[in-house]
Amino acid sequence: MIVFKFGGASVKDAAGIRNVAEIVARYRATNPLLIVSASGKTTNSLEAVVNAHCLGQGDAWEALAAVKAHHENIVDDLFAAGHPVRADLHDSFVEIEWLLEETPGHDPYDYVYDQIVSVGEFLSSKILAAYLDAQGLSAQWLDVRDVLCTDATYREANVDWAETGKRIAAVVPAMRQKGLVVTQGFVGVTPENTTTTLGREGSDYTAAIFAHCLRAEGMTIWKDVPGVLTADPRLFPDAQKLDHLSYEEAIEMTYYGAQVIHPKTMRPLQVLGIPLFVKSFIDPDGPGTVVDDRLVEQPYPPVIVVKKQQALLEVSTVDFHFINEDKLHHLFGLFSKYRVKVNLLQNSSMKCLVCVDDQPKKREVLLQDLLEYYHVAVVDGLELITVRHYDASLLDHLKFGRKLFLEERTPQTAQLVVQA
Ligand code: ADP
Ligand code: ASP
Ligand code: MG
């Protein structure tokens, strides 16, 4: 069996859903398991609902109305009046409305976030399942919370592999006998039956979890690009497609921030040797990119990954002591405590330079704590550029005309922190 993951871009409107149905119809004989993300930018729109409700940033009901309108347009285009999918979507919206009736602050932010933001995947999967069914493809809608078990780390839940494996084996093969199974990416459930999410862009990871647990023959993620490219084509329009990547190379690229695949996707596939195909839903016959454990014969071309919204923290001791192992231990304890992601670090006798994702809310609380022990200077508005398989002229080109704050090189990888 194969697992297909359709990302947000593939189901962004009614035409997108029709196109997905055409792709699925071609593969109907292989009965793929379908994982779907929220439609288009719905996750961002639902984040706006959460921020309006919890942080007072705008009107939550207005923000929710925009999400409703987006989905109603799709449904009106795809289904005749009176189709039961409308009632199904209504049920999902009611769940959000109940939460908005609560006084802000009643529940922790991360918990509320997961309850509201996960709804995007419920909406898109209900629409897709209903549409496939209406096309005679007999689809079964699966609530992923019946099978994908996690801990209660809201917004970044950790998968309980043993329980998830058991439940998937108990539920999914039987459902597949009855038709195409359609379920949600990104979402999980705690032992207490509350909804969690796996982290932004986590639907690829969901697909890999199912592929692993079902020992799939392959997994395909359908994208708006021809495959994995040597750089983000929005930033580097002449980026080239990579035909074949090793799991390790794909892990490295995505670990450094290449948005095309979620970094946690590869490991569950790699341990069972399940190939990953990255293909275009615009050109489904195109060859795409294959990620597997076959020998990669050609040397890799340079691959560029840009992480935006970075800040550099320059940490030094107040007592003129060196930044030794104890200090580093303490420092990293604070980064971990506030879940601030460290992307690059350079340590010298008196100074530690740390490049982090710049999330103002997290930075504020981290700094409060750091400043009790250290001098800290912050530079924001930066980018972290990582180049795998670099050459000197490309690095010069990337640095040209930009202020360089930090540079690190290993034989395979160069990293530059530069002004955005
Ligand atoms: P999905 O619809 O599956 O969620 P995303 O929008 O998350 O898709 O990811 C696809 C986008 O990733 C592409 O449109 C492209 O702009 C971007 N991207 C960034 N880096 C790369 C890369 N190295 N190769 C291909 N696409 C990339
Ligand atoms: N919808 C979620 C997001 O946009 C998960 C995903 O698309 O993979 O982050
Ligand atoms: Mg995505």
Image (cartoon, grey):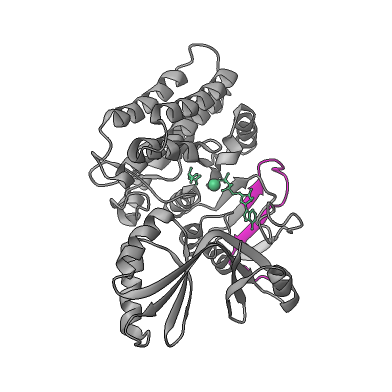
| Chief secondary structure of the magenta portion | loop
| Residue 298 visible in image | no
User: Which image quarter: residue 394?
Assistant: bottom right
| Residue 76 visible in image | yes
Place of residue 216 in the rendered image (x, y in percent of width and height, measured from the top left): 50, 52
User: Which image quarter: residue 122?
Assistant: top left
Residue occupying the point 37% across, 84% down: 323
The foreground one among 140 and 19 is 19
Answer above or below: position of 90 versus 270. Answer: above
Badge count? 0
**204 in magenta:** no
User: Which image quarter: residue 301?
Assistant: bottom right
Place of residue 90 in the rendered image (x, y in percent of width and height, measured from the top left): 40, 22
Q: Which image quarter is the C terminus in? A: bottom right
The foreground one among 417 and 296 is 417
Q: Which residues are magenta?
A: 278-296
Q: Is residue 52 left or right of residue 284?
A: left
Place of residue 153 in the rendered image (x, y in percent of width and height, measured from the top left): 31, 53
Q: Is residue 406 left or right of residue 190?
A: right
Residue occupying the point 39% across, 36% down: 52
Answer above or below: position of 418 versus 225. Answer: below
Place of residue 261 in the rendered image (x, y in percent of width and height, measured from the top left): 55, 55
Answer above or below: position of 418 versus 59. Answer: below
Residue occupying the point 35% across, 25% down: 94
The foreground one among 244 and 37 is 37
Residue occupying the point 34% across, 66% down: 336
Q: Is residue 44 left or right of residue 143?
A: right
